[in-house]
Image (cartoon, rainbow, N blue to C red):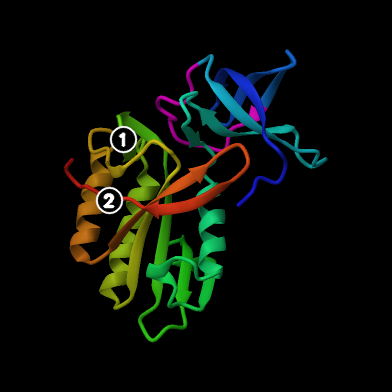
Amino acid sequence: MRFQTPLVPAVLIRRYKRFLADVRLDDGREVTAHCANPGSMMGLAEPGSRIWLEPNDDPKKKLKFGWRLVDHENGHFTGVDTSVPNRALKQVLLNRALPELAAYPMVRPEVKYGENSRIDFLLSGADAPDLYVEVKSVTLSRVPGLAEFPDSVTKRGAKHLGELREVVRQGHRAVMFYLVQRTDATRVTLADDIDPAYAAAFDAATDAGVQVMAYDCVLSPDEIKIGAPLPFVRNP
């Protein structure tokens, strides 16, 4: 999935109010960019970091730049836009390009289910039970090569795991899909110390039959696309 407009480099001045970032462009201008990430962005929002922005000329948007990447300046990138995993996975699912999920010809996003919830994708039409897919963006890494989720407490995430467990109890399939938006990760785990309630909900869900999939990303200032499977290790 290519970015809609070519990204431009900048230096982060500060991130604040979760969704705003003041940055300095290479031409010296200081602008405010939209940060599409409600998490803590631990380790990714240090002032002085090299980042990449996507410009836009949409008159409906107040902010003319969106923060898309952190450039680690060692050949690796992290994608910070939490809406990207859903868009990237939707493209792959519609093309039936993900082997584990390719048997399902019907892909419906944002379907209501459970208690006031929406599943990211409901797959159906195969000679198998319907498959509910919940997608999470993974950006935290505190140990080289190890990606972790979540980077802050997520009551909503724990609720989703409970909903998936109920889906399995009803006879359907459910997958928790972690897309690691880091090019330096080789495995994935949970950050139990950051959100023990999420970890407990995860264990209950997987014990009940919710499946776990983790994939890495191919990331650059030109594009982002789903890459290869990564091992999910519960207790690294």
Q: Nearer the viewer, residue 154 or 232?
A: 232
Q: Is residue 121 left or right of residue 12?
A: left
Is residue 36 on the magenta stretch? yes
Name the one closer to the observer, 4 or 73: 73
- The amino acid type of the residue labelled 1 equals Gly
> How far from the left and from the top, in percent, is residue 77?
49, 33
Residue at which label 2 appears: 231
Label 2 sits on a secondary structure element that is loop
Image coordinates of residue 32 in percent, x first then y, are 68, 24
Residue 186 shown left or right of residue 79 in the figure:
left
* Crowd class of label 1 (few under 14; some 14 to 19; many from 20; radius 10 Å): some
User: Under tag 1, what secondary structure?
Assistant: loop
Which range of residues does the magenta coloring cover? 33-46
Mark 2: few/some/many CA within 10 Å (<14, 14-19, 20+): some
Q: Quadrant of the C terminus?
A: top left
Relative to 131, does residue 76 appear above or below in the rendering? Answer: above
Picture disc at residue 94: none
User: Which quadrant of the view contains residue 143?
Assistant: top left
Query: Overall secondary structure of the magenta stretch?
Result: loop
Q: Is residue 47 above or below residue 73?
A: above
Disc 1: which residue = 145
